[in-house]
Image: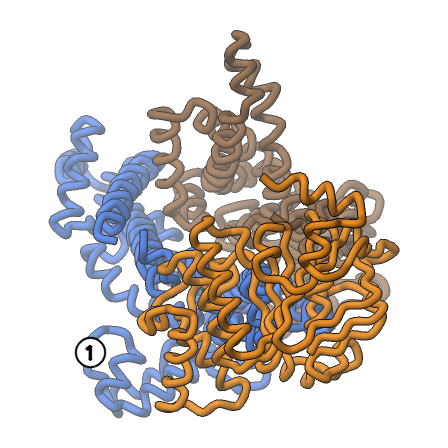
Chain colours: A brown, B orange, C blue
Amino acid sequence: MTTEPVRLRRTLPRLPDRFAAFGAVLLLLIVLAALFAPWLAPYPPDELRPLEALLPPSAEHWFGTDSVGRDVLTRILYGARTSLVIAVAVLAASATVGVTLGVVAGYAGGLVRDVIMRVTDVFLAFPALLLSLALAVVLQPSVTTVIVAIAVTWWPWYARLSSSVAASVATRSYVDAARCLGVPAPKIVLRHVLPNSLTPVLVQLSLDAGGVILTAAALSYLGLGAQEPAAEWGLMVEQGQDLFTTNWWVVTFPGLAILLTAFAFNVLGEGLRNALDPRRAVIR
Amino acid sequence: MIEIRDLRVSYGERTVAAVPELDVRAGECVAIVGESGSGKSTTLLAALGLTEGARVAGRVRVCGVDVLAARPKELRRLRGSRAALVMQSPQAALSPTTRLGTLMSRALRLHGARRGSALDRVMAEAVEAVMLDPAVLRRYPHEISGGQAQRFAIALAIALGAGVILADEPTSALDVTVQAEVVGVLRRLRAERDLALLIVSHDLALVSTIADRVLVMRAGEVVESGLAAQVLTTPAHPYTRELLEALP
Amino acid sequence: MPRYLARRLGQALLVVAGVVTLTFVIMRMVPGDPAVAFAGPKASPEELAAARARFGLDDSLPAQLWSYVRDLATGDWGTSLRTRRPVRDDLFAAFPASLELVGAALILAIAVGIPVGVLAARYKTKFPDFGVRVGSMLAVSVPVFWLALALQTVFASNLGWFPVAGEYDGALDSSSPLTLWTNITIVDALITGNWPILTSTLWHLVLPGLVVAAYPAGVIAQMTRAALIEEAGQDHARLERALGFGETSILTRFALRPALNPVLSLIALVFAYAIVNGFLVEAVFNWPGLGRYAAESIRSLDTPAIAGVTLLVAVVYVLANLVVDLLQGVVDPRVRAR
């Protein structure tokens, strides 16, 4: 029964540490680069200049040029747009679907919950990249395909997460009270259940963004995503891979861009989780 | 065996325990009483140098070791082999994946014992001294009762030959009948082995049955101290009276 | 325990049933006519009709699903449109190599991840911890296909320290042919004492193994660190401290075992992840496993083959989860008591 000071845990959320702040700054830079790509980029992204093909990094072309003479730095800046658009679209779609189903399942309980959760179990039985891969093969290769294919594999995580939160909220006394007063169920869900699910979902979203970017890049690398002449990092690695030994820059820089973006999201996500939701598991 | 002078434990700006003087001699039992947050557990942990993250000032000598100045190695030798801790929640205080015997044997070997039949004998004797069946040594913490776990914690101290036992609310997580058992064991061992006991409790009934002297703490300060019989029958401080009136 | 086991098995079966259905649905979404893909673009109407009848494409969807399930159960996983061989035989030939790669990578990841996690927990908020945090974060953020290309270019193509591609030196097939028992090269070489192939395989495993191990090693290190720090804050750690145990021995001898539980369930997740990540790595290193098979099937839109790979990996994943759940009983006596 003692609540002696030695046992006193810090109950206030700690501020995100410096490492997480570093991730946030890095991410901010990437977002700015994506937003202002047309102004920052030194060259047009699609202009072919065969005479300037495969130039090594220099003052004119910081990251060199690719096999058809396009500036690698320019294409990396534009590629940031593609990656971020994919990440935002996938996460928005899967969180919307997942949280809706999860909250309904958690609040309704019983048979509804069982059915929804068994369906999520099935989706969760596929490693995310595998199911995306199968779907991406079936659909026509494009950025939209990548978004759809990843979102289909990602929503169950949000369903599972929010259903457990919703189930615990649904048994609290103020929800009981609201129900007894005759407040309609949809209103209870919107007023009480949904807001309580948001913090863990937000934390999960920030943790997931890195994974989405890696998966999207992998699909494009396999030729199932963005197509020529789009500027996409995974695609750039695929196009340059045979030139790696002779022209290292065409592969190295796009790969580093993927690494840094995923790293920024992961670091920020970890920091947010430590600050807001310290008891959640490290990864999926 | 325990000698505390001008102890001051603080977290940041806040002082959570200030004890001007506290002595426990061999064969003696001293109790610190007070409500939750009064700083009594902190005082006890400070005696073993276990107050992580706190600033501790003053002088603390336990079995001749200056706890605040001791090097980590000296401190680790003191802990267990000479001064042992008994904690409030008996099962949570035992590692869930370690058999009781494994824990005891590791602790004994840490303090110099060798594996072998002599070790087994020491372990069996210690367990029997607290009236447990030596078969508990093969069990996991979740397979025994709270009273058994608490007696096992005492057996650990006995096996290690500790002359000082520091007990933090040793009975508050137990049923009334089991409480009596544990207190009985402590009293008997104190008499048999000349143990020095420092007990922290909010249970004045328990304290009156075992303690020679009492320290009353409130909000980190010692408000009254003296012989148990005297403090508990004719309390000088209003707070002590309050505590006594709260008794059933 | 037996009841728990039965319930767990029932759940797993249900999930497998769902997996089969979902795979079927996805494969029905393929644009174009599978009969055309099988019979070829120049097929006569009669040939097309024969192909349609052969694959049961004229039946209703539920009937097709039912015959699909029946075929799967009797071991008929369809015929690959590309290799024209039964998908099951193709998978059987390719899976052992994947298992070898992923198995080696996971062993490496565990051997690195757990000690590194312990190190970070021991020196929490100090320099080693920071190093582990940054390192593990980089390991989980790196695109595998790029890491594979980079290591291959630097250490194989440029420096020549390791072989560029393949599972072992093909010339050894004639000089010291391998007797197959398990189809897992490294195991067979070990059983039959075929040292040339064994060392060659180990040598070929280094680079792809490192790449596949990066992600699991990173998450295992993070999870071990987090679980240990939590466990070392429990009451029992204070008693152990009071008994005179040092921080390192509290972590490794008392906290590690309960902390391994979450790490174990993580390994099941990571196992499946590693197989799929392995697909990308196999493509780069030309490793003769499922990944290369899947990549080639994807390129030729070979739906039965893709369905086979998807099903196989999902089932393996369900099994891995089951095994881990049972292993948890071994590690943690409290789970056994359920």
Determine the image quadrant of residue B247.
top right
- Whole-percent x, y for residue C160 in the image: 54, 86
Determine the image quadrant of residue A112.
top left
Relative to B24, B138 lies left or right: left
- Whole-percent x, y for residue C257 in the image: 45, 68
- Whole-percent x, y for residue C147 in the image: 57, 67
Amino acid at dot 1: Leu
* Residue A254 to residue A89: above or below: below
* Residue A22 to residue B98: above or below: above
- Chain holding disc 1: C
Give the residue at x 29% y 52%.
C315
Q: Residue furthest right?
A: B13
Give the residue at x 52% y 71%.
C114
- Answer yes or no: is residue C195 visible: yes
Mark 1, residue position: C180
The residue closer to the viewer here, C147 or A110, is A110
The residue closer to the viewer here, B187 or B97, is B187
